[in-house]
């Protein structure tokens, strides 16, 4: 499986081209590296952290930013098995983050403190999926 850690330019431009003036929910599917891969020269390079430990650093450092923006985790689950889809897509972390708007998400990813914290995510993640959705309503049918 190809590792997806950061958006490529075309994906980020497509995200920015969508309406920004409504709440968004971001489906996060994350698989960790066995061993965190911090860049050479980083204080945690060579310390021997696992990907999960590095991701916890990311979560701890970004929590105040998320709270300040009015975002939250609205769902978290534990992976069990794939029923339909590629069997090799096994996820260590699965959650949905809700942002009051795409403006808030963009503010987060450009925040200087976030840009420092994201090194933990990059060190932690082997591959991921980050899928933007527009919240809908629940109901009693699939359609």
Image: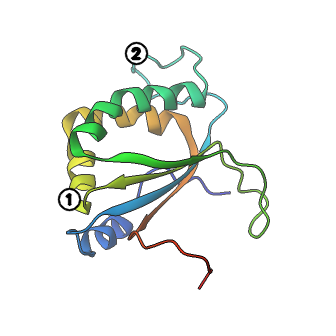
> In the visual, does 7 lie left or right of 13?
right
| Residue 88 visible to the viewer | yes
* Residue 43 - label: 2
Residue mark closest to the camera, 2 vs 1: 1
Residue that extends furthest to the bottom in the rendered view of this protein: 143
Q: Quadrant of the C terminus?
A: bottom right
> In the visual, does 135 lie left or right of 69?
right
> In the visual, does 43 lie left or right of 70?
right
Specify how the rendered protein is coloured: rainbow
Look at the picture and state if 29 lies above or below 39: below
C-alpha span from label 2 to label 1:
32 Å
Task: Name the residue at 67% across, 44% down.
Answer: 78
Q: Quadrant of the N terminus?
A: bottom right
What is the secondary structure assignment of the residue under circle 2?
Answer: loop
Question: What x and y, as percent, mark residue 84?
Answer: 76, 70
Task: Name the residue at 55% across, 41% down.
Answer: 125
What is the secondary structure assignment of the residue under circle 1?
Answer: helix
Q: Quadrant of residue 83?
A: bottom right
Q: Which sits in the foreground, 129 or 73?
A: 73
Look at the picture and state if 51 lies above or below 72: above
Q: Which sits in the foreground, 140 or 15?
A: 140
* Residue 103 - label: 1
| Residue 8 visible to the viewer | no
Question: What x and y, as percent, mark residue 110?
Answer: 21, 46
Question: What x and y, as percent, mark residue 130?
Answer: 47, 58
């Amino acid at each position: 499986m190809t590792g997806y850690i950061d958006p490529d330019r075309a994906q980020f431009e497509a995200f920015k081209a969508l309406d920004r003036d409504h709440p968004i929910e971001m489906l996060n599917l994350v698989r960790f590296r066995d061993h965190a891969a911090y860049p050479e020269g980083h204080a945690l390079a060579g310390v021997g952290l696992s990907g999960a430990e590095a991701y916890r650093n990311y979560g701890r450092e970004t929590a105040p930013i998320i709270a300040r923006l009015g975002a939250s985790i609205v769902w978290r689950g534990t992976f069990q098995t794939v029923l339909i889809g590629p069997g090799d897509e096994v996820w260590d972390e699965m959650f949905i983050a809700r942002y009051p708007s795409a403006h808030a998400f963009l503010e987060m990813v450009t925040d200087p403190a976030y840009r420092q914290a994201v090194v933990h995510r990059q060190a932690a993640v082997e591959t991921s999926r980050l899928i933007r959705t527009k919240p809908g309503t629940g109901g009693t049918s699939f359609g």
